[in-house]
Image (cartoon, rainbow, N blue to C red):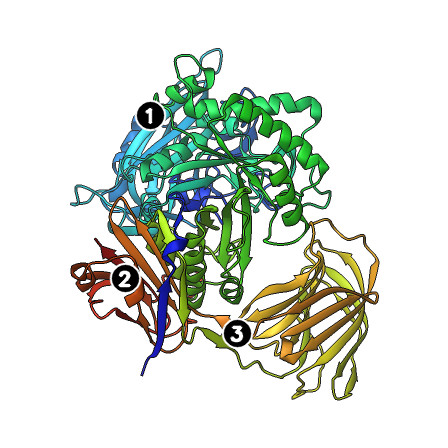
């Protein structure tokens, strides 16, 4: 027999909620820009890669130099009179005479016959450069690929054979472009060509037959001479709704989410690792050659082929409001030197830069220089910007306040119609959070950006997080959030929390899961909302949860109370084991473990090098409900700290104590952890050689934790043993005349939910109760779901009859019931 819940709606508690609640956030992390959403297949086509991107990278990264036996070629790098001073490097190909003189006509003949050559075509007869793309290039049957290159021949005209190379090394399509003879000025010429992979399919689609997954672009130089090359490009012509320069299947996955807004470009990308790495929006518009490349804060390279103009076009195409985020005149605090401000003498120019973005979006192109640039790029009409973010996860100190206030005041004065979104640090607690909120109230900031990455247990335990938010203060934008992992239980925890965010939509104005994209094999963060490789798109459970909310946007919500079994109480293990992990370097001396019954164990010293985990030799089978850990810890380097894990450290439920980046006590539940308490403030590094006398007291199998540093209590955490796992929330789209009843059942038994009072309170007619659309996301295993793969199950829809007022929610499920009328 199923459990039973009785739902009661508080009609008097009705709230008008934000209709911009559900959105997305695109940051170029995990190769989600170049090599991802950017449809460009050539990697490092501008020859601008260097050691700032990665220590092992150079100008020819992703290029393969081919010099057949008996030929001569030297491939160099030039900077003299480049195509664009912003990106000064280019390739120089010096080709010697190969088997006697050749002519342009012979090169054309070579291209015409390339597709009929035998295995010898796997290796060109003349020197060549091959671009390997991003993990290879995918080529599809019937697709046309647009090729372009900037060239400068030294002296006579020189042909370049262009070929798409398949997995077997043979050409799939080929043509010839010719660099004209150079004039006295040595000017550059852009050459274009199209290459079509022959197919009977007249209208290629993103899912057309793939005929190469490890393809390449080959440039062959059949005649002797010297030629300069730059900005090599190859893009498939197929688009999503004519949106050029975007990979269509990834845009389709975004559009299917129906986001109300899109935040861009970051995240940490926004202010970067230093002022030269700061994201300057005005350097990402106009001709792509003149957009200065830069290293990516997540460890690779940014060409800015997807710049602010392309971002606004993407928003327009998928029907999302833009929410651009600009630096608050500060660099990122996640560096050893801490945040560095824009010098005061440079602030007026920087403020002009901020105001220029608003003009670029909204001003009249006939009277404003920035709007004229928008029109020149093809968009005469304004983009109708409403929101502007200033800052991201900043250290909330006096310097930040000074710089932010100058920008905020300037925007208010020049553009009172713009809603500014501020920032309150990287976590839903701590010094930055508290000081950020205090400053936001003082300054009158309309909306503040909160971030929260947590375990599924935290989301369930903190459903009331926004219930007591000050309705008179700034509104909330939960700009980055997610449950650590891609299992069904993570999606269900987010669904439960999102229901309460919707209920609190009078103060929670917007929310966006993060990160948005991650390329398999290049992930910088886990989890992510959409995974992909060169061939496919993969949607984890969290994707479907976001879609189920965003496609059922409401404008009104009511509180609902539940009577019946709603919580989970875990049977925590009493196993006692210890390990050290984390990314910092520290020495551990005088290590000991003492259980409540008096068992004392001395443990060996550990010199931890940040490459853990290191297991400590605790006697096998040791068990205790309560115990104490002691250690003298000398901290050397590493801003992210070290952790002492305790309890059943090889299982899914144990404890952790973090030292270094503040101090905190944590519980790990179902494989992911969250902080119970702590003093984590900012991300400043600890001085090398700092020593702490550490005492950790664990009680009730880990439900209670106390951390003492040098004898002083710095963290006192208590876990509530009962975890809410069943929720019912109610909202309505007044315009469409649809009421949404959302039911989360994150327990192993189905449950009968009595909705009779809810339906009666909302005056739902009997005819509407009889035909209700139920969209259900469910599965048999709450831990199903692998990062980087499609979720094992996805939502399905069917009709249910609520005439008797009862809905049976399956075990491990999230349901949205759409009641019309």
At which x and y percent is residue 346?
Answer: 66, 23
Q: Gap in Å between the C-alphas at discs 1 and 2?
A: 79 Å
Q: Is residue 769 left or right of residue 85?
A: left
Q: Disc 3 or 2, which lies upstream in sequence?
A: 3
Kindly identify which residue carries mark 2.
759
Mark 3: secondary structure: strand
At which x and y percent is residue 776?
Answer: 30, 64
> Which of the labelled discs sits on residue 104, or is there none?
1
Quarter occupied by residue 88: top right
Foreground label between 1 and 3: 3
Relative to 766, does residue 563 appear above or below in the rendering?
below
Q: Disc 1 or 3, which lies upstream in sequence?
A: 1
> Which residue is painted at 66% across and 63% down in the image?
677
Outermost residue to the front: 12
Foreground label between 3 and 2: 2
At which x and y percent is residue 624?
Answer: 67, 85
Relative to 537, does residue 810 appear above or below in the rendering?
below
Quarter occupied by residue 546: bottom left
Mark 1: secondary structure: helix
- For the N terminus, the image quarter is bottom left
At which x and y percent is residue 375?
Answer: 37, 20
Asked if residue 68 shows in the view, the reply is no
Kindly identify which residue carries mark 3.
722
Asked if residue 562 shows in the view, the reply is yes
Q: Gap in Å between the C-alphas at discs 3 and 2?
A: 29 Å
Q: Disc 1 or 2, which lies upstream in sequence?
A: 1
Q: Gap in Å between the C-alphas at discs 1 and 3?
A: 79 Å
Mark 2: secondary structure: helix
**Dot 1, crowdedness within 10 Å: few (<14), some or many (≥20)?**
some
């Amino acid at each position: 027999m199923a459990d039973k819940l009785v739902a009661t709606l508080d009609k008097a508690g009705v709230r008008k909620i934000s209709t911009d609640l559900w959105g997305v956030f695109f940051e170029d992390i995990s190769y989600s820009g170049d090599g991802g959403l950017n449809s460009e297949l050539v990697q490092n086509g501008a020859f601008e890669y260097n050691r700032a991107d990665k220590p092992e990278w150079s100008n020819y990264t992703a290029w393969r130099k081919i010099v057949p036996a008996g030929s001569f070629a030297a491939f160099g790098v030039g900077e003299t009179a480049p195509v664009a001073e912003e990106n000064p490097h280019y390739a120089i190909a010096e080709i010697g005479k190969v088997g006697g003189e050749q002519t342009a006509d012979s090169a054309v003949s070579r291209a015409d016959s390339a597709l009929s050559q035998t295995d010898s075509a796997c290796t060109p007869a003349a020197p060549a450069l091959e671009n390997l793309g991003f993990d290879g290039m995918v080529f599809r049957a019937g697709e046309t690929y647009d090729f372009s290159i900037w060239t400068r021949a030294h002296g006579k005209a020189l042909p370049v054979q262009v070929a798409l190379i398949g997995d077997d090394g043979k050409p799939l399509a080929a043509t010839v472009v010719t660099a004209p003879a150079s004039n006295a000025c040595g000017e550059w010429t852009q050459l274009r060509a199209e290459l079509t992979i022959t197919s009977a399919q007249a209208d290629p689609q993103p899912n057309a037959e793939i005929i190469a997954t490890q393809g390449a672009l080959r440039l062959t130089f059949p005649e002797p001479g010297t030629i300069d090359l730059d900005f090599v490009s190859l893009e498939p012509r197929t688009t999503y709704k004519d949106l050029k320069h975007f990979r269509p299947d990834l845009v389709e996955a975004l559009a299917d989410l129906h986001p109300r807004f899109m935040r861009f470009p970051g995240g940490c990308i926004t202010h970067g690792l230093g002022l030269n790495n700061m994201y300057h929006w005005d350097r990402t518009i106009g001709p792509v050659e003149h957009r200065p490349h830069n290293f990516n804060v997540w460890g690779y390279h940014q060409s800015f082929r997807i710049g602010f103009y392309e971002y606004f076009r993407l928003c327009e195409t998928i029907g999302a409001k833009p929410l651009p985020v600009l630096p608050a005149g500060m660099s990122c605090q996640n560096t050893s030197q801490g945040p560095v401000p824009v010098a005061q003498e440079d602030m007026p120019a920087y403020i002009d830069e901020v105001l220029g973005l608003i003009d670029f979006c909204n001003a009249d192109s006939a009277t404003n220089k920035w709007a004229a640039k928008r029109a020149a790029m093809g968009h005469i009409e304004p983009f109708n910007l409403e929101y502007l973010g200033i800052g991201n996860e900043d250290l909330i100190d006096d310097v930040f306040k000074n710089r932010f206030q100058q920008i905020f005041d300037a925007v208010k004065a020049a553009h009172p119609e713009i809603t500014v979104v501020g920032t309150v640090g990287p976590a839903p607690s701590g010094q930055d959070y508290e000081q950020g909120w205090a400053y936001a109230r003082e300054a009158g900031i309309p909306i503040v950006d909160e971030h929260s990455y947590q375990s599924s247990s935290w989301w369930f335990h903190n459903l009331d997080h926004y219930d007591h938010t000050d309705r008179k203060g700034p509104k909330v934008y939960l700009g980055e959030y997610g449950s650590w992992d891609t299992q069904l239980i993570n999606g269900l925890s987010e669904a439960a929390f999102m229901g309460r965010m919707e209920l609190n939509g009078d103060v929670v104005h917007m929310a966006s899961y993060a990160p948005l994209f991650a390329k398999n094999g290049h992930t910088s963060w886990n989890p992510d909302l959409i995974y992909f490789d060169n061939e496919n798109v993969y949607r984890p459970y969290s994707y479907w949860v976001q879609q189920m909310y965003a496609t059922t946007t409401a404008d009104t919500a009511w509180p609902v109370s539940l009577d019946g079994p709603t919580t989970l109480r875990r049977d925590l293990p009493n196993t006692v084991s210890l390990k050290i992990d984390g990314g910092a370097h520290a020495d551990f001396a005088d290590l000991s473990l003492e259980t409540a019954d008096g068992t004392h164990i001395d443990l060996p010293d550990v010199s931890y090098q940040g490459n853990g985990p290191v297991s400590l030799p605790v006697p096998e089978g040791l068990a205790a409900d309560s115990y104490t850990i002691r250690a003298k810890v000398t901290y050397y380097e590493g801003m992210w700290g070290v952790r002492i894990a305790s309890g059943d450290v090889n299982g899914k439920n144990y404890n952790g104590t973090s030292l270094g980046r503040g101090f905190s006590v944590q519980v790990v539940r179902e494989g992911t952890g969250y902080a119970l308490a702590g003093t984590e403030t900012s991300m400043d590094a600890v001085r090398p050689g700092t020593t702490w006398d550490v005492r950790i007291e664990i009680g009730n199998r880990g439900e209670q934790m106390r951390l003492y540093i040098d004898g002083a209590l710095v963290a006192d955490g208590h876990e509530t043993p009962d975890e809410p796992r069943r929720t019912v929330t109610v909202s309505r789209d007044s315009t469409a005349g649809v009421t949404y009843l959302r039911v989360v059942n994150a327990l192993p038994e189905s449950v009968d939910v009595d909705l009779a009072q809810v339906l009666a309170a909302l005056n739902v007619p009997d005819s509407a109760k009889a035909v209700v659309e139920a969209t259900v996301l469910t599965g048999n295993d709450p831990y199903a779901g692998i990062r980087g793969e499609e979720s094992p199950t996805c939502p399905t829809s069917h009709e249910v009859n609520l005439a008797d007022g009862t809905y049976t929610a399956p075990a491990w499920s999230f349901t949205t019931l759409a009641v019309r009328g």
